[in-house]
Amino acid sequence: MTPGGAQRSRTRSLAAPLALSAEGKTTVNTPLPVRLPPQLLQAVASADHTDALTTESDVDLLPFIQRMLSFQPGWIQALYRVRVLVLRVLGHRTGVPPQGAVPEQMPTQPGQRAAFFFVEEAGETYWTARASEAHLTARLAVLQSPGQTRRHLYRVVTVVHFHSMAGRVYFALIQPFHFLVVRAMMRHGGGAQ
């Protein structure tokens, strides 16, 4: 358990934190199995890195995602600016997500752009999005199941595929901040201020 209630599960494969079966169901820490989205299942099979963080909340799925993705305090904006500098050193160009996003206006439907992600799939209990750059492709998934102490258990999953050595170097540099940022976004998504 981490500060703020998020639990950290990190492994090369989602098989351990998600108890992934051949049918694409998860049963670890959830009262009912959750069906994994098809594109997430495919991405996990060949991933270079996966991790999953969990939290419980009474906030429903779409507001959770909208609040999570619109969370951009000054310290996260500063990290995005550092990210741009690191990528320039590695020979890549990328932007910073636009500031001032309003949670209720954050897109959540397939084909729409949410922050620097493109939404791939959205269902009653899941949402997945992808960001592809020259050095790597990252997927973010939010999986919802019944909670034990709150209405919902959320599992926020990151799946990364490296396209080059620059992708590996970049991710090694940002990985500690990745967990910090995702945890903070989850707390905000779940209703913490």
Image: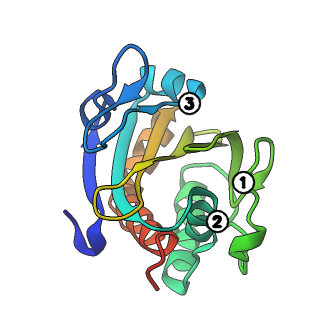
> For the residues marked 1 and 3, what is the alpha-carbon distance in whole angstroms?
15 Å
**Quick check: marks 1 and 2 in contact, CB under 8 Å?**
yes
Quick one: label 2, few (<14), some, or many (20+) residues within 10 Å? Answer: many
Residue drawn 61% across and 44% down? 124
Q: Is residue 151 above or below residue 70?
A: above
Instruction: Answer whether labels 3 and 2 touch (C-beta < 8 Å).
Output: no
Instruction: Identify the residue shown where x is 36% and y is 62%.
Output: 56
- Under circle 1, the secondary element is loop
Amino acid carrying label 3: it is Pro
Q: Does dot 3 land on a helix, a strand or a loop?
A: loop
Disc ID at residue 164: none
Locate residue 158, reporting x and y percent.
Answer: 45, 45
Left or right of 100? Residue 10 is left
Q: Could you tell whether 174 is left or right of 136 in the image?
A: left
Q: Nearer the viewer, residue 81 or 23?
A: 23
Question: Residue 44 is drawn in which quadrant?
Answer: top left
Q: Amino acid at mark 2?
A: Gln
State the image coordinates of residue 14 (x, y, percent, origin top left): 34, 32
Q: Residue furthest left?
A: 1
User: Label 1 vs label 2: CA separation?
Assistant: 7 Å
Name the residue beneath numbered marker 1.
108
Q: Residues within 10 Å of mark 3 (few under 14, many from 20)?
A: many
> Given the image, on which type of amino acid does mark 1 rest?
Thr
Q: CA distance from mark 3 to mark 2?
A: 19 Å
Q: Quadrant of the N terminus?
A: bottom left
| Of pointers 3 and 2, the one earlier in the residue sequence | 3
Find disc 3 in the rendering and name its residue: 37
Q: Residue furthest top?
A: 22
SS for dot 2: helix
- Which residue position holds label 2? 66
Q: Earlier in the sequence, mark 1 or mark 3?
A: 3
